[in-house]
Image (cartoon, rainbow, N blue to C red):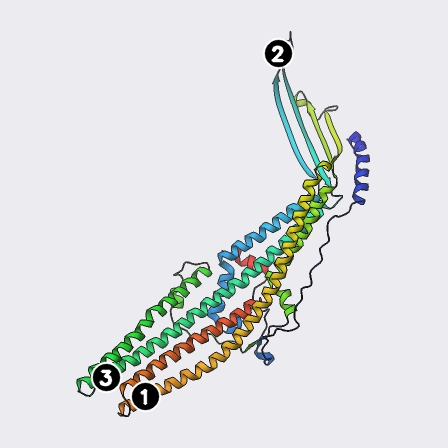
Amino acid sequence: MTDFAAAARPLAATALALALAACTVGPDYVRPDPPAPALFRGTPDAAPPAAQAEPGGPFWQAFGDPVLAALVDDALAANHDLRVALARYDRAQALLREARLDHVPTVTAGAEAASRRDSAAQRPGASRAERDGEAYAAGLSAAWELDLFGRIRRGVEAGRADARAGLADLQAAQVAIAGEVAQAYLALRGAQERLRVARRNADNQRDTVDLVRARFDAGRDSEFDTARAGAQLEATRARIPALEAEVAVAIHRLGVLTGRTPDALAARLEAPAPLPTLPHAVDPGTPGALLRRRPDVAAAEARLHAATARIGVATADLFPRFTLGGLLGSQALDAGALFERDSETRLVALGVDWSFLDMGRVRARIAAAGADADAALARYEQAVLLALEDTENALVRLDRARVEDEHLERAARDSARAAELARVRFDAGAIGLLEVLDAERTRLQAEDAFAAARTRSASAAVALYRALAGGWPPSEALRTATARH
């Protein structure tokens, strides 16, 4: 052991000197500063602070619907797409741990027992017993790459950036799943509201048909009026199956989004409920804050960082690679003699590997890594532009949807009043059946349009929250919740 230490000492000193002289090749990453406007063009007038919703909070709570909140929580705990995203993040973390271990020596242990017989031609005149032999060996070996030019450090840097990208992808998946659950739930409640409107109008029109038939039987109306009233009733009834299908489809979607079978939530959600109340206003903040919050932008930026670091990994191949290796063991012709005095073996070596005649391939890999970084930069800049576009569009759609709601609400209210007055005037003989049927048809169209518009407004609010990237729980909370399923 003393001899081994004495032999290793000068090599260790040499390795230390080389390590102190180490440098890191390749470009250092500089975070881009994307241009962004000071304010969103579609920013609505500021609402009272109590009516504003924080874009960074759980957006589904702003709707005040406990069923919706429970469904989103279920989806964040059990959705299969989120489980895939979580597994990808775990993979990136594992690869980062592997890259970090390249900083420390690789130590292996081995043992060997062999029985050998030489041929008579190899040992002429020797007996069979003399040609037989055994050999035993055991030992530890270690190898350590001296990271003089930063190949390992750049690899760890790239792995760390990949892990950040995986975490951002997980957060983006959370936002997307929460938004999809909210959209499906709003589609369900909107379809149920339109179904209620259609059924109520069908009941009113059935009463009209009964009245016209009674008048026809009394000789006061013609068969033409009876047929026309019946046709309008059947047209209204024809709306109902399609709306019932929309309800079923939305329930099935919510079942799968929450990690269940499509029919698992049918009993829980089939009972109609009103659309959730829209938040009065949503403060989008500033574009700069949005870009810092959007997980898709963060993922693109992390991948740009990783691609930049890999230029350094490729560049390090232009320089020699130094490896410090060692072996400590024992060899003997008899198993009992292992580890006895004079059976020890040792080796300490400093290796240099430099493929200086292969510079063309190395430079080609460096060029390829640079092209990957250029593509990553373009993807990052595109992610920034798409995030700004997504938010501007969502702001405009929500603002216009609210205006549409106001008009259609008044139209539905006025058409309902007109239909009631038409029935009164018809009973009094002041107008004919045609005016009554037209008023009822207008009422159905207006009320259905208002219910559809309210659904669009709620969906527009969800789209804005998704664009603002608000509403995912901390990553560790998701990990704990997922582990329970």
Q: Which amino acid does label 1 sit on?
A: Ala
Q: Helix, strand or loop at disc 1?
A: helix
- Which of discs 2 and 1 lies nearer the camera? The answer is 1
Where residue 268 sits, quadrant-wise, is bottom left
Work out how far the residue at label 2 is from the one at label 3, CA to CA, in angstroms.
121 Å
* Residue 324 on image: x %, y %: 74, 36
Work out how far the residue at label 2 is from the one at label 1, CA to CA, in angstroms.
121 Å
Q: What residue type is labelled 2?
A: Ala
Towards the viewer: 196 or 395: 395
Where residue 137 sits, quadrant-wise, is top right
User: Mark 1 — residue?
Assistant: 422
User: Mark 2 — residue?
Assistant: 129
Residue 265, can we see it? no
Work out how far the residue at label 1 is from the one at label 3, CA to CA, in angstroms.
14 Å
Q: What residue type is labelled 3?
A: Val
* Residue 420 on image: x %, y %: 34, 87
* Residue 402 on image: x %, y %: 50, 78
Q: In this view, does 62 lie above or below 119?
A: below
Instruction: Name the side, left or right, on which 220 lies relative to 358.
Output: left
User: Mark 3 — residue?
Assistant: 212
Query: Which badge, 2 or 3, comes first in the chain's sequence?
Result: 2
- Which residue of the protein is positioned furthest toward the top in this rendering? 125
Query: Which badge, 1 or 3, comes first in the chain's sequence?
Result: 3
Q: Is residue 385 above or below residue 50?
A: above
